[in-house]
Image (cartoon, rainbow, N blue to C red):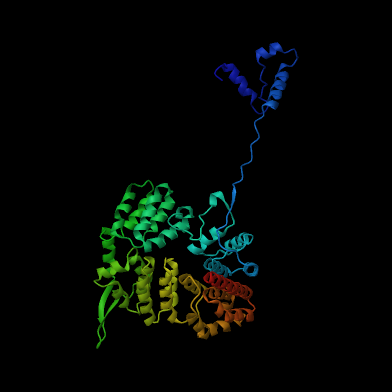
Amino acid sequence: MSGLSLADCDALESAFLIGLGRQALPPVASLAELSDTPNPTLACLVLVAQRRRYVLPEPVAPPQPRPRIPRDDGRPMLDAETGRLLQRLVEACNTRNAAPLLEGAVARLEVSGFRPHPFQVPRIMAVLKKQGCALGLTERAYLAEIDPVAERGDVLPGGAGGIDESNWTGFPTAIRVDYIAALRRRDPAGARALVEACLAAEPANVRVELIGALSAGISPDDRPFLEGFAQDRAQTVRDAAARLLSLVKGAPANAERLAKAAAALQVASEGLIRRKRVLKPASSATTFPQFQALFERLTIEALAERLELSAAELCRIVQPASEALLLALANMAARSGNADSLAELIETGRSGGLAWTAFANVIDGNSMPLARGERRQLVAALAPFGVDPFPRARDWQALAALSGEPLPAEIARPIFMSPGWRELLAALGDEKSPRRALADTDLAALAKALPIAALAPVIQAANDAGLVIGGAIGAYAAFAAALEARTTTNQTRQDSR
């Protein structure tokens, strides 16, 4: 363009105009002199077209497909008969309200040590997604491991041990956060070290979630780590670290919050002959949400120390009639992963007639990371509460999530002898009952929570009422029974070797 005169530039611009104002560009003088044709412009156009034919750009190659990696995690495959029962269950659960049954099937598969046939896995994944199943950390890791073919960008670490310190960074963010939260309860320093080692390479949203996973068991040892985020480039990360710093004992914000929480409580003496100390609200008008706001980011231990009590004593002397205070303290214990204090609070609530479903929902709502022994401890504490009125689906789901395994038989037996169960059967027999319209979800959640040997009354109740979920529960029971038998046989063979 630098060799063109102003007139040449004007001529070039007019050649590209749209409409009647466009004027053809005159041929280059050197070409016009060499051409014998009467129309040199046309000749130049032909030359340009011929050149264009031979200098066409290379065709754009289609993107290379991402390599698909066949994987075998080493688990033995289900036998043909159990595989057919699993397929039947998946097909029967391709209807609404069957999510609890699918969740229970995946949990049982993970515990069994078997895997389905690779051809079945895509179908299972599709139905789990369609039903919106809520799976725990262990179940999600299991599904990632049994996927027979994975895209390279989505490969997750495999191995019979699942997620651990050596491979946790390769899992999706949600699984990593759950893993760190669970590890934090067992090994606070180890969890902090893992997070500290990987944060530099993570985006801001992931840094926020991993820092938040360290909230359980916060201590002065975490202060240097958290203070290091004061200059982080992301405001959300600085805020997340500041929130945890406010939980550290001795921090000004923590002391102020503790003072406000303690001011809302009073330790009084009750009884005429046998005097005893009771912890109750300073004002009977204080509601559960208000207590929740006061106790936010506090721990049972810190509040007990402020009131000059031990944590166990605080839980034992809570006034059973103060339901809002009792549930707020239970929520605080669950949030910090304090299973011992939570069991004490459940016992206190039981003595005051508080419904067990309130505690089950508090635990489930906090996604409390628990060891198997702690789970059994809490389930045993909840068990004596009975089932009258009969719990709804969300309550059975919460109890099943807390248990992590089918309820013990001694807990399941009283269910079918309770007035609540008889009332539910009566509602199922009444086509105009609003309870009948929601029974599919209730019965599916109950079936997931119960041991297989106790499912016969549930299947019969659903079939007698003509509910579609009856067939799905029957398929679930058949698959679970076959899987248990297969697992027992396999274990016997291993023991005999």
- 422, 121: nearer the viewer: 121
Q: Is residue 166 left or right of residue 466?
A: left
Q: Is residue 463 left or right of residue 342?
A: right
| Residue name at image x 32 percent, y 78 percent | 319
Q: How many marks?
A: 0
Choose top left, top right, bottom left or bottom right for residue 348: bottom left
Q: Position of residue 98 (x, y in %)?
A: 59, 69
- 312, 307: nearer the viewer: 312
Choose top left, top right, bottom left or bottom right for residue 375: bottom left
Q: Position of residue 164 (x, y in %)?
A: 44, 58
| Residue name at image x 57 percent, y 16 percent | 5
* Residue projecting furthest to the front: 497
Q: Position of residue 117 (x, y in %)?
A: 62, 62
Residue 287 visible: no
Q: Is residue 437 left or right of residue 318?
A: right
| Residue name at image x 37 percent, y 82 percent | 351
Q: Position of residue 173 (x, y in %)?
A: 47, 55
Residue 40 visible: yes
Choose top left, top right, bottom left or bottom right for residue 242: bottom left
